Amino acid sequence: MEDQEMQLKVKRVTDKFTESMYVLANEPSIALYRLQEHVRRSLPELVQHKTDMQSWEEQSQGAIYTVEYACSAVKSMTNSSLYFKNIDGLLRQAISLKEQISSSQGRRKRALDPGMLKDGVEKHSSGI
């Protein structure tokens, strides 16, 4: 009886040992299979995210370039305020000179026109 009991215990131990060896022998392949399965499921989504990120990066670079260009334009405009002040002064001077010329031409025209009196009233030469 003891022999039979011992054989049963030995069989159980060997079965457990064989099962453990089988699991250990197959575990890496199962892990690799699960890993491959995970990669196949998640790879398309990761590729889509990568494509989206590249597109956003391009758009961001374009926006950054636009903003930098606008900033440099504003800086150059603020640096040109001296030129605008100079232009403003020259325009005011030109307007003043134009008004002086117009006024002197008007006086000269009135002085040279024989049909006009000094006060700007026309002489009437009536043949009556």
Image (cartoon, grey):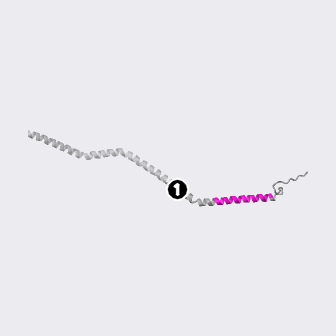
Of residue 62 and residue 35, the one placed in the foreground of this image is 62
Asked which quadrant contains residue 76, the reply is bottom right
- Rendered-image quadrant of the N terminus: top left
Residue at mark 1: 71
- Among the 4 quarters of the image, the one containing residue 84: bottom right
Residue 108 as seen in the image, left or right of residue 87: right
- Please identify the residue farthest to the front as the structure is shown: 119
Residue name at image x 20 percent, y 43 percent: 19
Q: Residue at x 36, y 46 (%)?
A: 43
Q: Is residue 26 above or below residue 118?
A: above
Tag 1: amino acid = Cys
Vertically, is 42 above or below 83? above
Q: Secondary structure at mark 1?
A: helix
Q: Depth check: 38 or 87 in front?
A: 87
Residue 56 lies, in percent from the top left, at 45, 49
Whole-percent x and y of residue 90?
Answer: 65, 60
Which residue is rendered at x = 12% and y = 41% of the image?
Answer: 7
Quarter residue 114 falls in? bottom right
The stretch in magenta equals 88-110
Q: Main secondary structure of the magenta part?
A: helix
